[in-house]
Image (cartoon, rainbow, N blue to C red):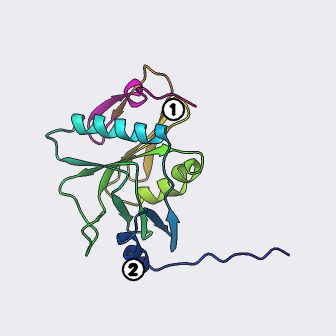
C-alpha cells in the first residue's frame, strides 16, 4: 500500500510573511506555496527581449513594464503569481495594505516551459481572466517558433491568434504596440 502525502495548506498571511523573507520566489495557489523554478537561457533571453521591446515601444506612455520579479494578486481566487512579463497601466494599483503586490495588469506574457505550459494555458489563464483590467495574454514557446495571443474583445470574449513564421507581426491592441516574431526570437537557438 502506498501512503499518500498530504499537501500542507497555508494562509495568505503565512505565505506573504515567508515570501518577504525568502531568497526564492514562490507562487501561492489555493493555499499551496509553490517554488518557482529557475529559467533556461532561452526563457530568460526571451523574457529580457520582450521586456526591452516593450520598454522602448512604451516610452513616454502611461504604462509600467515588469519582468519576472513583480508579484501579482488575483483577488477573486486569492492567488499570487509572478508573470514573466507584465504591462500595467499607471497609476499602478496595489493590493490593499501591500506595497509589493500589483492588481491591475493590462497585458501578461508567459514564456512556456515543459513543466508549466499546460498550467499557463489553462488554470493560470483562467485566473488572469478574472482580473478586470487584464486584456491581453501572450504565450511564447521557448523550444520552437510559436507565439499564442489571446485578446479580449468584450466581457467573456477572447480572440485567439497564433504566429509561427519568422516574418509574422502581431498587434498588441491593449497597448497599441506592434511586435515582430523575428524580434521576439532574436538570437534564440532552439535546443
Residue 12: image quadrant is: bottom left
Q: Where residue 77 sits in the image (x, y, percent)? A: 45, 69
Q: Which of marks 2 and 1 is in front?
A: 2
Instruction: Determine if residue 120 is in view.
Output: yes
Instruction: Determine if residue 30 is in view.
Output: no
Residue at the location (17% across, 38% down)?
59
Q: Is mark 2 on a helix, strand or loop?
A: helix
Q: Where residue 38 sits in the image (x, y, percent)? A: 49, 51
Residue that protrudes farthest toward the top in the picture: 167
| Nearest to the observer: residue 181 or residue 27 | 27
Q: Which residue is labeled 1 in the image?
A: 146
Q: Is mark 1 on a helix, strand or loop?
A: loop
Residue at the location (46% across, 29% down)?
188
For the residues labelled 2 and 1, say whether their Cβ atoms are less than 8 Å apart: no
What residue span does the magenta drawing correspond to? 172-190
| Nearest to the observer: residue 88 or residue 35 | 35
Tell me if residue 146 is in the magenta stretch: no
Q: Where residue 10 sits in the image (x, y, percent)? A: 50, 79
Tell me if residue 186 is in the magenta stretch: yes
| Horizontal side of residue 105 vs 12, given as left or right | left
Residue at the location (48% across, 53% down)?
125
Q: How far apart are marks 2 and 1 (CA)?
A: 38 Å
Circle 1 packing at 10 Å, graded few (<14), some (14-19), many (20+), is some
Q: Which residue is labeled 2 in the image?
A: 13
Amino acid at each position: 500500500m502506498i501512503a499518500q502525502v498530504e499537501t500542507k495548506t497555508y494562509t495568505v498571511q503565512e505565505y506573504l510573511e515567508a515570501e518577504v523573507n525568502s531568497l526564492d520566489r514562490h507562487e501561492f495557489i489555493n493555499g499551496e506555496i509553490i517554488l518557482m523554478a529557475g529559467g533556461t537561457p532561452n526563457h530568460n533571453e526571451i523574457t529580457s527581449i520582450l521586456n526591452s521591446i516593450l520598454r522602448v515601444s512604451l516610452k513616454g506612455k502611461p504604462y509600467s513594464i515588469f519582468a519576472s520579479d513583480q508579484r501579482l494578486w488575483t483577488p477573486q481566487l486569492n492567488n499570487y503569481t509572478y508573470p514573466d512579463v507584465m504591462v500595467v497601466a499607471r497609476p499602478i494599483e496595489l493590493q490593499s495594505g501591500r506595497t509589493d503586490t500589483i492588481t491591475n495588469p493590462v497585458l501578461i506574457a508567459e514564456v512556456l516551459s515543459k513543466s508549466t505550459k499546460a498550467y499557463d494555458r489553462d488554470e493560470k489563464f483562467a485566473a488572469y481572466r478574472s482580473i478586470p483590467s487584464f486584456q491581453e495574454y501572450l504565450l511564447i514557446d521557448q523550444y520552437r517558433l510559436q507565439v499564442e495571443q489571446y485578446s479580449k474583445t468584450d466581457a467573456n470574449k477572447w480572440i485567439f491568434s497564433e504566429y509561427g513564421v519568422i516574418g509574422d507581426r502581431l498587434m498588441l491592441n491593449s497597448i497599441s504596440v506592434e511586435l515582430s516574431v523575428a524580434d521576439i526570437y532574436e538570437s534564440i537557438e532552439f535546443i
